[in-house]
Amino acid sequence: MASSQISSLGTPVMDPKYAPLPLVAPGHTNDSVTEKIAHMTMEKETPRAWWLTLLVALAMLGGLGTAILGLLFVGIGLWGPNVPVGWGMDIINFVWWIGIGHAGTLISAILLLFKQRWRNSINRFAEAMTLAAVLCALQYPLFHTGRPWLAFYWLLPYPNTMGLWPNFRSPLIWDVFAVSTYGLVSLLFWYVGMIPDLGTLRDRAKNRISKVVYGMLSMGWRNSARHWSNYEKAYLLLAGLSTPLVLSVHSVVSFDFAVSLIPGWHTTIFPPYFVAGAVFAGFAMVLNLAIPLRWLYRLEDVITMRHIENMAKVMLATGLIVNYGYFMELFMAWYSGDFFERYMMKNRVLGPYWWSYAALMLCNVIVPNTLWWKKARTNTIWLFIVSLFVGVGMWLERFVIIVTSLYRDYMPSSWGYYKATQFDWMFFIGTGGLFLTLMLLFVRFLPAVPMSEVKMILPGAEGRVKR
Amino acid sequence: MAQLFPKQANGLSQASIAAGAAVGASVLLTLFLLARSGYATGAGTPYDQPVPFSHNHHTTGVGIDCRYCHTSVETSASASIPPTQTCMNCHSQIWTFAPLLEPVRQSYRTGESLEWRKVNDLPDFAYFNHSAHVNKGVGCTTCHGQIGEMPLVFQAQSLQMQWCLACHRNPEQFLRPKNEVMAPVWNPPANQLEVGMKLKAEYQANPRLSCSTCHR
Amino acid sequence: MSDVHIPISQVTRVSKGASGAKPRFWRSLDELAGSEDIKVWLHREFPEKASEFTDPEGRRQFLQLMGASVALAGLSSACTRQPAEAIVPYAKAPEQFIPGKPVYFATVLSTDGAAQGVLVESHMGRPTKIEGNPDHPGSLGSTDHFAQAEILNLYDPDRSKSVTYRTETQTWAAFVAAIRPVLDAQKALKGEGLRLLTPTVTSPTLAGQIAELLKQYPLAKWHVHDPIARRNAMDGARLAFGRALQPVYEFSEADVIISLDADFLGLGGDKVANARAFSARRSFDTVADREMNRLYMVESSISVTGSNADHRMAVRAAEVEGIARELASAVGLPVEKGALPASAMAKSIVEAMIKDAKVRPTRTLVMVGETQPAFVHALGFAINEKLGSLGTTLILTEPVEANPPSAENSIEALSTDMAAGKVGALFILGGNPVATAVPESGFVSAMKDQTKVALRVHLGLFDDETSELCHWHIPEAHALETWGDARAFDGTLSVQQPLIAPLYDGKSSHELVQSLLGDSTSTSYQIVQAAWKSRIPAAANFDKGWRRIIHDGLVPASAFPAAVAKTTPGAWMQAEPASNQGDLDVAFRLDPNILDGRYANNGWMQELPKPLTKLTWDNAVLVSPKTAKRFSIPEPEGSARGSFVDRVRLEVGGQSVSMPAWIVPGHPDDVVTVHLGGGRKRSGKVGQGVGVDVQSLRTAGSPWVRSGGQVTRDGTRYGMGCTQDHWKMEDASERGLLRTGSYEEFKANPGFAQHPGQPTEMGSLYPAHPYNGNKWGMSIDLSACIGCNACITACQSENNIAVVGKEQIMMGREMQWLRIDRYYEGDSESPAVHHQPVPCMQCENASCEVVCPVAATTHSDEGLNDMVYNRCVGTRYCSNNCAYKVRRFNFFLYSDWDTNSSLTLQKNPDVTVRSRGVMEKCTYCVQRVNEARINSKNEGREIREGEIKTACQQVCPTQAIVFGDLNNAESAVSKKKASPRNYVLLQEINTKPRTSYLASVRNPNPELHPGASEPTEGEAHHG
């Protein structure tokens, strides 16, 4: 599939020994970058792999539809929860998706403010991933209720005929605001960042339809200096705006648990611990997407080893924070001297669900710590595997927090167990399908790598980077 | 290369922003009004009844007291709809052959009930108690409207929760002396608030706002 | 998913499954509407349970688990307008009929052998709730759980609806015509071949009718068969006194109570009265109040009574007799020694017990249970007599049974006659003997033999196993549908009046017998009233007297006088001592919930967690931990899909059944207990095939125990619906949930239950709630509570609580608002048992209120945690955040929304019927609170103390539950909360519960209970 042009570029072989690696492979010019990236979209015929994955994704999406219909017609009882374990897969997956959504904004906003220019080639689809993940996450709070047809608007404060407000003391209401704000700002950030590239696509578009569509989306972008200065301003402002959100969203989500009185939930360490975990999982997901994408579209020279390794480093750092969180939970349970806390922790590690805690330790503590070694950080195969482990690990973390806290709380007489049903899984896989579909459509129709920003970091283009 | 969009596209795109906002706002406004409209609440429409019973005639006209028919309004949650018997108390004497009243006579003969269409219909999860209100100086017309002027009864109020709360929060706006509670047509005096306050204290009318007052 | 470690692998596995399942699912979506195929669907959903879902169609229909149509109604209700409703007033209104106001009628229910006076609440002509009649000695204002369940039986859609001949539908007239020739033929034979078979009859009117019948047919016979009848007691009295007499207990006089297998709190028509009097001597706040009684329980199985004993000896059946003999010889009766339990502890208890009895002989009560043979009963009478307690703690009266069970009128005698072809016409007036008679009695085979009895007639509520083998089946009128009369345990007479016309045109025994007398037209009313004409003295003002009796629900001072009787020492005392046969006894017991199976079709009873095992929807082989080890029976294994145990093959006397085995701490060793009433074959949609039928194992000679049993694991696993037991009640002492001490400790330190160092007042971030009016609270006395379950059923009946079925129970989704936690204290061989009812705590700082996003649960101005069903969207956050886990969630459409079903007639109109996806919980019966408040306001007064009784409080036989106004220092509840025994659950988390407990006090013999200075609490023990 590699076109003659690309081979003429002579993609150099990456060698981890040379560091610091360049952000863009040598030999690239503005045009070559444009060619390369714009080609990924409509201009070139779609790789078969893309079609196949889309097929799988749509099948999974069908599962989601089925699960939702079943839920609406028959009832939430199709899912696993009971008393005492009132939340299961629903909230586990909600928190998991939200977490994944984090990397996007972090990369785009925070790294931008910190002038981490290596972000420039990965931020775009990291942001797209954020949006997709948030969309998936939103399915759960809505559908996990017993009466979703009421839940979706009764949680909003609006002038209603009942003369009632929602209960602003409830963390679930805080969630509604935190998540929707986050989603909205991320969307804006993503879109604004894309405008110059949309302009490029418009100009390169072959047929009228894509011309018009890209034209509208690019909002008459004409590359003028005035456009650029406005664009830079807007982009920087949005970055500033979304930075606190990166921290707030998951802190608020963690309040769902921290605010309650259940041993294992009622913990002050949750906000930082959740945010770190989210970034951890987010970067894992970015890698899980970047590595295949890079291979699929031969992007080795825009998403270079340096990007990959930096991401691995962030993963290691956040991973260590999470590990510290695990340790603190154990320590605090012991240090509190509180019977219920101690019992909860003992039971969490050694009780009937010991396997979940053990697996968590494997996925989130043992495996990620291999990233101390540069060899591991620069081996894409291994990184891919580590990222998978981390993804699973972060899912397990939520399972451990939710299930193994609820199922044995204060009164032994009402203890129970939790086991997900087929519908739980169908729904989860379904949201996976939703995520994949969105990402696939994104790489097909929109510039997955920001051309304009990559150009800013071309060798010799440094001067043009005002940031 | 050729212009993709005509010149006015700029203007259009800017206008579209305003337009989008306007459309969104009007949709919300429509929903807001619709939820309060007679269509949604059922207020304002009289229904066909087996017999076109006129409260106007029987109360303001003939001067029958509410309690003659709605016997349990002071003692029970339900005001109670009178049995056919009650109609026949009079109509075995007067209008004995009026064709309009045939259903009534038939019901009395056969023992088959008359099927009235319920006009003021609260949802089943809201537990309203007539006695609790009537005994605290809340008049019939406060909720049922100027019943004495209705040939055919229609729902006068929205019966929505915020409407209930309006009174439960500030009863003084509506309270009246107990001897006027059954007035089929009633208009508040100019100094209603003042009177209301007095009555509120006198009748100890302290409506509750707890959920379980009406929902259980 | 406990069997999957790495979700990814699961994902791939399931995604295959899901895509494979899709078409199937689509089909079942449509089917769910009229869902024929729910079974298949459920099998997919609960794979482990596949085999258990018997008669899915029917069970689902009853439980209303789901149904797309209704679900859609739920959907649309959000966005459409209200449906049109009609008002249908009377054409001619009945007298004193006020719409919206319930009316109460006094009547009686003979649910357990003798009459319980009840007041039945009736809304717009339909009875909805049963309460006790405070004036009635058999009720004292409370009832047992059976009486509560009767209301559901009344509306059971499975009740038989028409007269049938064989299977074809017939008419009453046709029946009357058909039996006439047979009766004429019998006339000629002086009724030689005419037989009546009835359950226990205490009705004087019916007895009179039957006497009249026997006059007309001198050679006819009246047989009695009833698994709850007191055959052994009567025979025992016959042995001891030469005639049938019944014991009536005076617990107020008894300081030392020795029960030999007598489950006087759990079974029998006198259990409510017993419970009241017994616990009155066990609950108090100051030592001065009264001396505490002491209960020694010797039992060969497990029982509610045993769980309340101060000393309990779990022994084998023969050893009960042995201990009785020990006691007898100790008081100087010339009897041989019998088998005694081997354990040293049991021996020491027996000694102490005898010593105790000798210290206050006249204030000792020795009682013997129906499961013991006649001889032990006789011995029991003799011992009481010898102690001089006969007449003080134990009163003898004439039996309330009009025809006390005996060998002559037994079903065995009848069966012999039938087999011998001596029976031409058999009339079965109620009951279900084919299912409840021991097969060995030969009754079933005789019934099956078509050549034997020419005419077999069955009068019954259900078209059951018996009607299947009868020519004619007559639908019986329920006790709430017809007139009659009955005697309470002490002989007190009551008239039974109907609350509603027979739903299915049923006939009463009175009417049937009357038709045998040649009068097939007079109604129960006429019959009963005619019979009472003679009974009311001054016939002049009969109507007045009659009306008073009906209004009061009893005839004053009509209890039997104490009978004077002396034991006749004779040969009976020289009877051969029973000895342990074989190394395993099989004890047969009436099921605590469905008795002999008569409540098998009653969802409330099937789903009621059994007092000690907390099992629902099943019976099992109950076995002690030690004996379980002997047969290597494993402990139940908890899971999210039920608690799984091994099935075993229980074999005795060549017969065998396969049942799940369940380990019960404190169960006697070398004994297994099986409950009757399981495995019904024709019970209706609910009870069909629930549990296992163990009748085949029993013998007519000794129906309650059989020696020489064998237990072998058959290797298969079985899931049970247990609401508690497979979760170990561990660390209860650290958790401080259940607090108990001995009477000695209490005397030494009344505040023993208070935990030193526990903060009493902690702050809150939220401002305190002001309470200007009332402030409701509840106190539950753990010393008084006997764990009888009446409160749970009353709550279910009052609050329209749904039945969810075994599968949902196994998923941990039971709906009862009130649960009774059961704690074991001490070692697992002979633990003390404690019961702790747990309703909503109605916390002051309620954790549920804070977290609900839509404010569906809020704090009322009277301190209740209101739950607003119509506002709830179902996030289940409140339940997660409830430390007591007392909230219940409608995961499916559990409630019966089918308005065509007769079951909807039972619903309490003052309580919302909850829909799918809605949280619910105990409300302190807020509908009753509101009713009282509105009445008081209308009358311009304050709510009176005691004016409001919650359903659980009103039904409680021991008055353990007290509800009232905490703002009134004089109220009963305020006084209770001032008691030194008062404590709340989980005080340290500062939820400030309004429901508090009074620590349980037991009265072990100090000689046997050395150095119990430390307050002990429920310890780590499991079932």
Image (cartoon, rainbow, N blue to C red):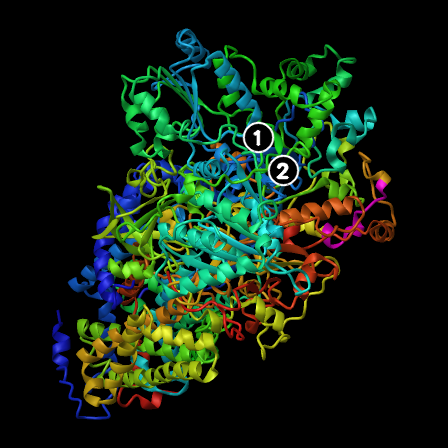
The residue where tag 1 is placed is: C486
What whole-number distance in Å separates the C-alpha atoms at marks 2 and 1? Answer: 45 Å
- The picture quadrant where one finds residue C699 is top left
Quadrant in the picture for the C terminus of chain C: bottom left
Query: Is B189 situated left or right of B5 in this image?
Result: right
Residue visible at 22% across and 72% down? A293
Range of residues picked out in magenta: B167-178
Using the image, determine if residue C728 lies above or below residue A342. above
Tell me the chain of label 1.
Answer: C
**What residue sits 63% from the left and 71% below the top?**
C766
> From the viewer's perspective, is the residue at label 2 or at label 1 nearer?
1
Q: Percent x, y for residue A214?
A: 34, 64
Same chain for the residues under marks 2 and 1 in the image: no
Magenta span has B173? yes
Q: Chain of mark 2?
A: B
Q: Quadrant of the image for the N terminus of chain C?
A: bottom left
Residue B4, compared with residue B26, is above or below; it is below
Work out whether residue C1016 or residue C419 is closer to the camera in this orientation and state it: C419
What secondary structure is found at the residue carrying circle 1? strand
| Amino acid type, residue under disc 1 in the picture | Ala
Q: Nearer the viewer, residue C219 or C71?
A: C219
- Residue A135 sits above or below residue C932 on the image: below
The image shows a total of numbered marks equal to 2
Which amino acid, by three-letter code, is at mark 2?
A: Asp
- Residue at label 2? B121
Evaluate whether residue B172 shows in this view: yes
